[in-house]
Structures are given as C-alpha cells and as structure tokens.
Amino acid sequence: MSSDNHHSALTELGTELLEQSDVKVTRCYQCGKCTAGCPLALEMDYPPSMVMRMLQTGNPALEEKVLRSFTIWVCLTCEMCFARCPMSIDIPKMMDQLRQKALLEKKVNRKAKEIIAFHKSFLDSIRYTGRLYEIGLFVDYKARTLKILDDMALAPAMLKRGKLNIFPEMIKDRSGIASIFRKTSKKHKD
Amino acid sequence: MTLGFYPGCSLKGSSREYAESVLAVAKAFDIAIEEIQDWNCCGATAAHNMNRELSLALPARILSLAEKQGLSEIVVPCAACYSRLTVTQHELAADQTLKARISEVNGMEYKGSVTILNIIQMLDKYITPRLEGKVVKPFNKKVACYYGCLLVRPHEILKFDREEDPQSMDELMLKAGATPIDWAFKTECCGAGLSVSRTHSVGKLSGLIVGDAKDRGAEAIIVACPMCHSNLDMRRKEINEYLGEKVDIPVLYVTQALGLAIGLDKKELGLNRHFVKVTV
Amino acid sequence: MSKIGVFVCHCGENIGATVDCARVAETSGKLDGVAYSVDYKYMCSDPGQSLIKSAIAEKGLTGVVVAACSPRMHEPTFRKACAEAGLNPYMCEMANLREHVSWVHEKGEATTEKAIDLVRILVEKVKYNQSLNAIKVPVTKTALVIGGGIAGIQASLDIANTGHKVILIEKDPSIGGHMSQLSETFPTLDCSQCILTPRMVEVAQHPNITLYSYAELESIEGFIGNFKAKIRRKSKSLDEKLCTGCGLCTTKCPVKKIPSEFNEGLGMRTAIYVPFPQAVPNKPVIDREHCTYYLKGKCRICEKVCPTQAIRFDQKDTIEEVEIGAIVLATGFSVKQPDFFPEYGYGKYPDVITGLQFERLASASGPTLGEIRRPSDSKVPQNIVFVACAGSRDEAKGIPYCSKICCMYIAKHAMLYQHKVHGGKSYVFYMDIRAGGKNYEEFVRRAIEEDGVNYVRGRVSRIYEKNGKLIVKGVDTLLGAMPVDIEADMVVLATAGVANNDAEALAQKLHVSYDAYKFFAEAHPKLKPVETNTAGIFLAGACQAPRDIPESVSMASGAAVKVACLFSQDELTRDPLIAVVNRMAPPVYSSCVGCFLCVSACPYQAIEKEEIKNRAGEVIKTLARVNPGLCQGCGTCVAFCRTKSIDLQGYTHEQMYTEVMALLNEY
Amino acid sequence: MAEFEPKIVAFVCNWCTYAGADLTGTSRIKYASNVRIVRFPCTGRIDYMLLIKAFDEGTDGIIVSGCHPNDCHYTSGNFHARRRWIMFRSLCDFMGIDIRRIKFSWVSAAEGAKWANIVNSTVTAVRELGPYDEYKKVAKKPVKEVIHG
C-alpha cells in the first residue's frame, strides 16, 4: 500500500549509502561547491563532486572506480563540503561508508597504503592498551610501511620536550576494549 | 559541582602542555575537575575511517564511564575527541536500535545524559564571567584565533558558534587582552590525521594557515586542538619549506594564552614543550 | 419520488482503465430512486453533455449525479448543462472517480467498489438537494492597486483606460519600484528609467487614477465587488498642495548621511528627501527616524527655506476609507540581505555587493554616475566575479527555488561591465544558464561570444579578502571538477529574490493564500495565474514569484482584464451556498433561541440580530439572520448552533447525514 | 484469513484537503483504497455529532482534515474545528471510543503526498486496532433498519 518507492532510482550501492549514511546521491546537482572548498581536491583522483557524479550514473564500472579511488582515503573529513553543501549532503559520512566498503571488498587504492597503515597502527595501539601509545604507533607504522627514515628527527625532539611517553598508558579494563574490537570487527559479524 | 574531564590520548602524550594549561587555569579559578576513570581512546579519525561501529562504541564507553562516575558535565579540550564524543551522542540519540547495539557491544549501559563541553564552552561558562580583574598580564599581542574543523563543524550536530568566521575564541582572547585579527583561515583544515602518512600535504595546508596569519601581522596563533597544534607547531619545518621562508610565529593553546594573561607561570603552562619558541 | 440520473464518465482511459465504469453505471441504476444510468467515454464533451441534457428532458430527471473528475474541475460545467436542460443547477452533484479513485488506486475489485460507494452516497445526498437561486450583489467599480512598481503601474493604467476608477497606493514616497533602480534592461539594453518614467508620469496625470504615495493598507473588509478598505496615508510632514517640488529643502537639510534606499546604500540622502530625481510624485517627505527636529526638537531649517511654507511638522497620519470592488496585489519582492552568506563575506567586505547594488553602479543616475567603481576605494575593478545562485537553489539556506531573473541580469551585468571597463576581465560562476525567453539565449551568447565574459560552470565555495583582493574559490566542473581561484577586485552576488518581509501579514489581512516562501499563491498554477483563491483579489508581478519585467507587465495586464471583466457587470452572481436561519409560523417564528453563538463564530460578521415585532411595534423575539451578501458559506455557524436552527444550503444537515449514513450501510 | 480492511470515512474541507487529495490524484500517488471522502465546505462546518453517528453506524476509523492554521479559506473555520476537536477527544475518551481511531490533521492543497501518507498511516493504525464493534456488540441492532427507518 505504501507509495514509498523512492529507492527504485538508486543502485545497490546508492541504496546502501542512503541507508547507512543518509546520503541520497541523486540529490546532488553538481554545483561543485564541495570541490571548490575542499582543501585536498587537487590531490584527489576524483574530486568530491566527481565522486557524486560517478555514483549518480549507476554505472558499475564507475562505482568500482570510486571504491578503488585514492579520494576516499585522502579525504580529511574536515566537514567543509558538508557545511557548505546547498543540498546538505553529508559527504564526509558517505566517505566513511565508502572507505569501509573498500576495505571489506579489498578494493583499496594502492596509493592509500600508508594512510591505511597509519590507521591500522593507530587502532592496534588502542586495541591492546586502551589508549594511544605514540611510540608504539610510530614503530608499528614504520614496520608496516618501511618508511624508516621519515620523521626520525621528530621523536628525539619530542622526547626532549617530554611529549612522548616511553611506556604505554595501560587502562585497567583492557579485556573490555579487546571485546569491543572483537564485537565490532567485520570478520566476526554474525 | 565537579566538572568531568576527558583528556584523551594526545593530552597525555604529545600535547601534555594542553592538559597542563587546562588544569592550571581551572585551578586558578578553583574549579574542581575530575578525570574520567579508566578512560579509553575515542578512536579518532582511524576508527571512523575504518569501522563505523567501533567509532561509536569507543566514545560511548567513555560517556558510559562518565555516567557511572556520576558526572553530569564533562570538558573535552581536544577538538577531535570533542567531535567524536558529540557525534556519537547525537547518532545514538537519533537511533534507539543503534544505541542498544552499542550498549551491548560495550557491555555497559549508555544513557546519553552527559553534557559535553568543548574548551571554549567550558571557559565561557566557568571562567570568562569571573575574568574581570584577574587579567594581570594582558596577553597584548595580535593573535590569529584558529578554530580548525572539528570545533565548529558540522554545525547541525555541535551547535557551537558559527561555521563561517566563528567569533567565540576571538572574544575570549579580547578579554585576555589580546587583539584578535580578522583573517581568512580560521576554519580551514590543517591536514589533521594525515600528519604522519602524508606529511607534505600537511605542510601545504598548515603552511597556508601559518602564511595567512603571518601576512596579516599575527604575533601568535591560538588553537584549541592538539592535532592543530602539533601540525602548526611540530610540522613547522615542513611549513617553512612550503612557504619558502622561516616563520617563527608561536602557536599557543587558548588555555596557555589565558593562563599567561592571569599571571600563571610559563612552565606551569607547559610553554617549554613547544617546538616553535614562545617568547612573551 | 426522486428520479435521479447517474452519468459515469470514463475520462478516456483515465477512469475507464482502472474502474469498471459499466458496472458502476449498472449497479447505480438499481439504486432506489435512480431512473436512468449510463456510462460514456467523455462526459464533459459536447455529446456527453447532450446525453445529460436529453436524459433530463426525456426521463424527467429530478436530480443528476455525474461520476467523473473532481468537482473542483467540472462542477460548473455540469451544473450549467443541467440548467440548460431546465433542471435547477444545484440538483447536480459530482462523484470524484478520477482524482480520488482511478488515479490513486490500482485496478481491481476494491477500486470499483469504492467508485460505486461514492456514486451511491451522492445519489442519496441529491435526493435531499434543493433548488437554489443564485444571489445577486452589486459591484463597486473602483479598483485598489497595492504597490506602485512596474506591475502596479501597468495594472493601474490598463484598468484606468477601460474607464474605471483606480486607487493606487505605494508604501514608498515614489512609485517606480525596483525597475526605477535598474540601469539597462535585458535583452535589449534599453535604459530602464527612459522607458519607465513616462509611465510613471502617465499614472500621476491620469484622470481615473488616484495616487497615494507613502501609504499602506490598514485594513480591509467585505467581499468581491464590495470591499471597504482603510488606507493609512503616512504623514509626509508636508502640505502637498503648497509644495512646488523645488527641492530647496533637500539641499539645505543638514542630515546628509543617511544610506539611500534607492541607491541600495551605495549613496547618501538627506532626512527630507525625494528618493530620486524622476520621482512621482516629485515632492519630498521627511524621514522622521533621522530628522534632527523629530529626534532633538530643533532645526526646522527646511521650514525656514521653503518658499511656499509647505512644511508641516505636526502633520499626523490620516486614514482614508474607500469603497472598492476589486484589488490588484502588486507588492513585488525583495533581495536577500547581508549575513546570509558568511562564506561569501557579504556584509563584511564592502566590495562584495548584490546585483541590485551593481545596477546602481551601472546606472547613469547612480552614485558613480554609471562608472563601475568599487565601494571600498572607488577604484575601477579590473577583475570582477559574478556569482549566480547566491541563495537561490540552495535548500540549506531555505531557498530551494530558482529566482529566475538572475541568469539574465548577470549576463547583462557582465556585458555592461565589459562595455564600461575596457580590458577588464569578468567571470561568471553559474550552475545552469536559464535563458528561456524571447531573445534571451541570444543575449547570453552575445555576452560570451562578443563581449568575452568568462563563464565558469561551478559554484563558489568561499570568498575572502587578502591584500586588497577578493580571493574567490570556485570550481570548473566542466574540467573534471578543477578548483579555480580568482583574485577579484569586486564580486557581485546574484542574491535570491525573496518575498517582502511584510508579505505574510498582508496576505493574512487580505485572506489570500501564500506559499512556503511567503509569495502569494495563484488560484491555479496554469489556468488562473493572476487570480487568488479569494474572489476579487488579483496578482501582478513578483509578489507571486520572482518575475522579470515582461512577465510582470503581462501579469499586470492580465490582472487588469480580470478586474475589467468584473466591472463589466452591474451585479455579481454568487453561489447560493450560504447559511440560513429557519423561519416558522408565528408564534414560534423560528427554532432559533437567540443565543447568538453564531454571531461570535462567524468570520464575516454576516449574522445580524433581527427583531420580530407585533402589530403594536413591540419586540417579541430576537432572532439571528444571515446577510446573504456577506455570508461566504463556510458553515461554521451551523456546527455551533445548539438548536440546529441554522443550516447551510448545499451542505444541509439532512444532506450530510444522509451521505454518511448511506456510505456506512453498504460500505 | 484475509487481512482486516477497515472502513475509514474522511471528513475534509473543500479548499485545502479536498484539493490536496485531488493533487494526490494528479500526482498519481497511490494509497489505500479504504477511505471514502465526504466533502464539506470547511472543517468549521463539521458537526461532531456526525462523527459519533459514523461510529454508531459502523465506521472503523475517521479522518478529519482541513487547512493549516492561518490558511483557512474562511479565515478561522479550522480554528473552531481544532477547538472542538480538543473537546471531542476528551469526550471520545470518556465514551470509550479509542481516539487512535480518529486522525485529525491539516493537509493543504499543495500536500498531495501528505494526504496519501495520512490515509495509509490511518489505515495501518486502524487495521492494528481491529474492527470497531464494541458499540455494536452492546447495541445488537440490525444496522439496515436504522438508516431507512
């Protein structure tokens, strides 16, 4: 009886974005204001408004390109696009969704491996201690990316200024944190 | 009444001077502050980039702990943590199923009853009204107040100040004796979480910010976020490379500038920990 | 015994494809009191109407139910057909099988059942319908035109030229409206003042037009053909009969720094002022909010210098009461003002201006005498950026609609700039170019191809000032969404056209509907574009939606014709669907007990007290009586009446009860 | 057993809701066919006795809808209807008529989609409540006779 057939114009991915992040790709009218204000538009393979356009086409090849894009990883989630979007499209939230889908489907852009390595190192650090252990993060990140020499000067300078803890801060309820990680892990989803 | 305190990881590590200055200022005004016990990391950018549920569960745990501890109001000086906590509260309030799911994941009841204050809101509520007469060493410098992204956006959720050309920090600094300048990069992004993984992007974005502040004659940049601070301060080498000149405008936390104005000691405020030397 | 005819329309496929019309006709034919039933392809067509007419004649029908489209569409058609066949038109009812059945439900048993139900209840209702006669009311053949912009001017002149009287009221000291502020007009680039001023003068001199400038509508009562309006004539502090319009006072006034409304704040005016040199009437008013005398009790310089002693400091507002038969609303629009666009720095940077401000810069009579100079330092901008859709088509800012006129005036602005600043560079950031109109697209092409205006497809995210330049951060979406930064000397925002601040209050005063954006609502989006849903009140120009000059003028002439049609008759015929208080034989006279709750409920003050007197002239009973001229037929009194003594013709208690009862007993 | 299809009578004003329902048609928005519209000039004309009578005669649900506040074609009829509705609610409560069976709303001439939603949601709500037969069980009167009697 319901007349709610609004989803019919959307592809599977489009529907997923609508349901998971409240972004209806058809609402974008391609004004480009998001791109115009995006601090990193020039470093993206497809600027935000192009991503919206690609998703609008419903063309599976273009949707695939979006998932495999560098854009979704270099996006800073600075929220500027959303703040100024005349159609109030929550692009940052959509980017989160696209990143997670790309990870799940193993379609991650190769250029993004350092960014993801950093995120993984970061999450690993809190998975075990409950809080961020900055030295641990650096070491782990360097192990993942083999970027041994980068930022080498920074750590001693930080240590000197008392900005780094030698030992991690451990919270008491570490098993609780571990359990949160386990339960929210995509692999363990029931 | 006791004000709850969520420092977040940075304030225990690379930005400990922020915590030091917050606590010093609070102490100077006899504000009782109580840290949330056994708090965890909010998950920051990494969590919401990688896993939405995790990005809600971690902040929810923090808020649950605050509730358990009987705190009705907490201050979250880190703008990024403030954003994550507030967004989580907003999303869970809007979706009961999600709220139930997150409570189950955390194994902790989550009510959503805690009021979350960012540092400016905290200062405006508890300190600004009592500031008159306390400013013994006016911070008489031209300052560029830098708000960054997460203190003001998205406005629909945070409902703090205004998204374009915000004023709250400027007003506060004016009261501390400073002259806030009108500049163009108040809410542009510094590069945030890409600091380590894409340092050159951060050099450029932060460079634009520092460059504009310099061009308009700022003598200090005032921030309210450890990420902004570390990018503008610790990445000054990359910034100067991008700008092609040596810019030595110091970057202070809003609480440090305020602390100086009310006559607190430089060391007490952690000013010795900065990369760009603070000369006052 | 009723003899009712049921006529079921297929409306081609519209009803026929979904509803089993033959079965509706057949089933209805078996109803008690139905003498004839038939289905037909198009009941509203000539043959369809003939079918009804001949059935009335041949079968001697006493009532008709047409099951077709919405009665809001064709009830007048079928009632007229009935009348032509000799049946009282109010004995005809319509069942809505199209909008309420076939268009909203799927084909099937339940749908046809619903159609049958709708016919049945109206058959039952029609049994209780009464023959009614149309009500005649007189017409006052004077029109009130509210607003003296181009639309109001055109409407006034057209009505006046048909020989009828017009009262034109304008809230500002001069008529002319926004059009008088414009420099040149698209798509011909003829000077706005040159074509407008003669019309303004014509208004002032027309024997049939009474012009009240500096006047506003205070209140209105009555109904079509018979309105009574109170007009507040704001005090000008001036005896207009004595004033010769020499203008000496305005040159001597010491308060000279008031931002001029006419120049959109880019120029200054005095406290006693004529808004612009060609103003009609060309006589000054004193702005009491700024006048030193009114503020501080001394000065009176204007009074001293006036050669005819025309200044009247103690003059009060006066209220003029006028009787009118029709109203044309031509109150125009406003442009969205500062602090609406913090990301564009509007209101913060003096060189970010609105399109209307640019008109004043480009106008030969403007503050720069037609030279394009930026407000901050009077320099000629070498790089200029025009931003389209500054507010329009922006849901987040609450204005999702297209303001319609901006695409054209931006092209004009950029063109004027290129003509006036040789070697200057102009950029237009746009989303779409909407140039639908005679010679409009050609005009835009000329701007691009001949005048070299750079059109960039994309929206601007932000504008900020640095080193005396305005940094415009835009994007070129046609280059794969490439960010484009332009260092401009001046930026012109095509700010959205919005309804006036007081539009809502005026609409409520007049009982005229308005849309979500406070623009006045037309009675039908296509077929009644200048009518409102309040009879006798018509619309012209941008008070209905953003409109350009040709459209405003067309609408105004359209509205004028509607007024002229109304005034072509001495009496109006109105639907007799009004309330009546029952009357009985003495000594009861009526079941009305004289509680007069109905009087308090009536929104039209249409119910009066009537005294019944005996032969000796003594009052023996006081009853309610409905004034048929004032009653609009809402029926609120009916629901209020405790003794059921008042009833609404066409929707009587009997009719409505029967309808509902019939529905539920077979449903 | 087939799903219970409630009978819904809609009392609407001519200028807003009737026109709004026309717009639902012109926009071709589909909705539940359970509803039958009875046209009044204004919600101010609606005598609430008629609502009680409708329940008496076997309707399962009722919609009353007119112009939004301030938009009444007759200025204030809808305000009277609203005031009466507030009283009527309490009366229904008192009489034991579940007020969830009555939907009181504003639908303007521009709200075609809203009309469809209101009909659908009312049908769903009343379907959940089941047939309105509390009164009939007690009265035990043959419905037919009452009408034509």
Image (tube, coloured by chain):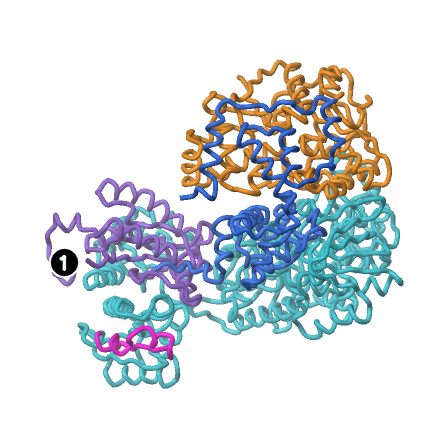
Give the chain letter for blue.
Answer: A
Can residue C303 be seen at all in this image of the molecule?
Answer: no
| Residue sitting nearer the eye, B54 or C382 | B54
Q: Is the N terminus of chain C in the top left, top right, bottom left or bottom right quadrant? A: bottom left
C62 displayed left or right of B117: left
Q: Colour of chain D?
A: purple
The x, y position of residue D7, in whole percent, is: 25, 58
Assess whether residue C22 is covered by the magenta stretch: yes
Which element is circle 1 on?
Answer: helix
Q: Relative to B152, say whether B251 is above or below.
A: above
Instruction: Name the subunit of mark 1.
Output: D
The residue drawn where x is 30% and y is 43% is: D89
- Give residue C400's position: percent from left, percent from top: 58, 56
Relative to C157, residue A32 above or below? above
Query: Is residue D71 at all visible to an observer of this figure?
Result: yes
Direction from residue C513 to residue C547 in the image, left or right:
right
Q: As rendered, which of B76 and C517 lies closer to the eye? A: B76
Q: Which residues are magenta?
A: C5-27
Q: Position of residue B116 (x, y in %)?
A: 55, 29
On the image, numbered disc 1 is attached to which residue?
Answer: D143
Q: Quadrant of residue C330?
A: bottom right
Q: Quadrant of the C terminus of chain C?
A: bottom left
Q: Residues within 10 Å of mark 1 (few under 14, many from 20)?
A: some
What color is chain C drawn in? cyan
Output the letter for the chain in orange: B
Q: Left or right of C89: which side holds B272?
A: right
Q: Position of residue C315 (x, y in %)?
A: 70, 45
Q: Residue at x 71, y 16 (%)?
A: B268
Image height of C51 relative to B127, above or below: below
Queried whether the magenta region covers residue A103, the answer comes back as: no
- The residue type indicated by label 1 comes to Val
